[in-house]
């Protein structure tokens, strides 16, 4: 199927705008902001007891926001990639990592004369070497079963929606033998699944930029509101010395 690139751009733009709306709602939720500052960060605060509550709270909130935004964008792009695969490959099976299958795959589709098994991630930072080796082993075992019993030639793929731009073959030496994985990242990934040269610069980048411009003003106001909430939170737990009042902070119950 030939993709309508204008429609593809618009669909992604709307998905990213929806994600921005969710982030803005999160920033406007003062209780969630306070919770996230405290959650799993109290011991970190102790280690940074030489800083002011405002500096500490701002640093923790910035870290949380960056992580949350990256995760949400990764989810949007992952879902978008699956939608594209169903358009380009009509017989594609979207599994979304179903646990009931022999191995957690996001999509299975026919690429050339091979059955492609795709595991999609936001970047190559998704796991350590042990986790990658374990996934490679499972994918290799599954591919061997399909080859031996059903005579299917399988192509194992790890696709990264972002990160560095490259396409290469990685080999993992596992307990089940040698397993080859085709790794396609960023621009190479989008071109690989769509067959459209420079799909990333033609569709992905413009769509994300358009969504960012559309939501820029609302995002700015939400961040300003979150900053005010941080200041109020910090002032409440600041000692005359300017340091964090840990006893009061420990007693804070936000449940």
Image (spheres, rainbow, N blue to C red):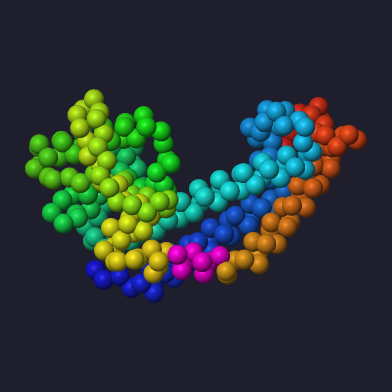
The range drawn in magenta is 205-212
Residue at 84% over, 43% down? 235
Q: Is 147 situated left or right of 247 in this image?
A: left
The quadrant holding residue 88 is: bottom left
Q: Quadrant of residue 176?
A: top left
At which x and y percent is residue 119? 32, 45
Residue 14's spot in the image, x, y percent?
49, 66
Q: Residue at the spot x=45%, y=65% of the render?
A: 205
Q: Main secondary structure of the magenta part?
A: helix
- Quarter of the figure that contains the C terminus: top right
- Residue 103 vs 13, above or below: the answer is above
The residue lying at 24 percent from left, 68 percent from top is 1
In the rendering, at what x and y percent does residue 226 appear? 72, 52
Taking the image as shown, residue 159 lies to the left or right of residue 171, namely right
Which residue is at the front of the view, 251 or 163?
Answer: 163
- Taking the magenta stretch, the answer to whether it contains residue 211 is yes
């Amino acid at each position: 199927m030939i993709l309508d690139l204008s429609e593809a751009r618009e669909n992604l733009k709307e998905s990213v705008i929806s994600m921005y709306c969710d982030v803005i709602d999160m920033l406007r939720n003062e209780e969630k902001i306070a919770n996230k500052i405290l959650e799993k960060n109290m011991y970190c605060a102790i280690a940074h007891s030489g800083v002011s509550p405002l500096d500490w709270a701002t640093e923790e909130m910035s870290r949380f926001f960056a992580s949350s935004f990256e995760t949400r964008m990764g989810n949007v792009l992952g879902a978008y990639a699956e939608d594209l695969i169903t358009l380009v490959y009509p017989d594609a099976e979207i599994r979304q990592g179903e646990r009931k299958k022999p191995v957690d795959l996001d999509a299975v589709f026919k690429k050339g004369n091979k059955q492609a098994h795709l595991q999609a991630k936001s970047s190559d930072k998704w796991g350590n070497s042990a986790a990658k080796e374990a996934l490679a082993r499972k994918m290799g075992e599954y591919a061997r079963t399909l080859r031996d019993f059903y005579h299917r030639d399988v192509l194992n793929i790890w696709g990264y929606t972002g990160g560095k731009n490259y396409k290469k073959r990685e080999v993992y030496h596992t307990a089940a033998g040698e397993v080859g994985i085709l790794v396609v990242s960023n621009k190479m990934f989008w071109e690989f699944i769509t067959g459209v040269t420079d799909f990333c610069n033609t569709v992905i980048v413009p769509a994300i930029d358009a969504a960012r411009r559309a939501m820029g003003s609302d995002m700015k106001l939400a961040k300003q509101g979150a900053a005010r909430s941080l200041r109020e939170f910090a002032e409440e737990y600041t000692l005359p010395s300017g340091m964090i009042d840990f006893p009061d902070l420990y007693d804070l119950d936000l449940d």
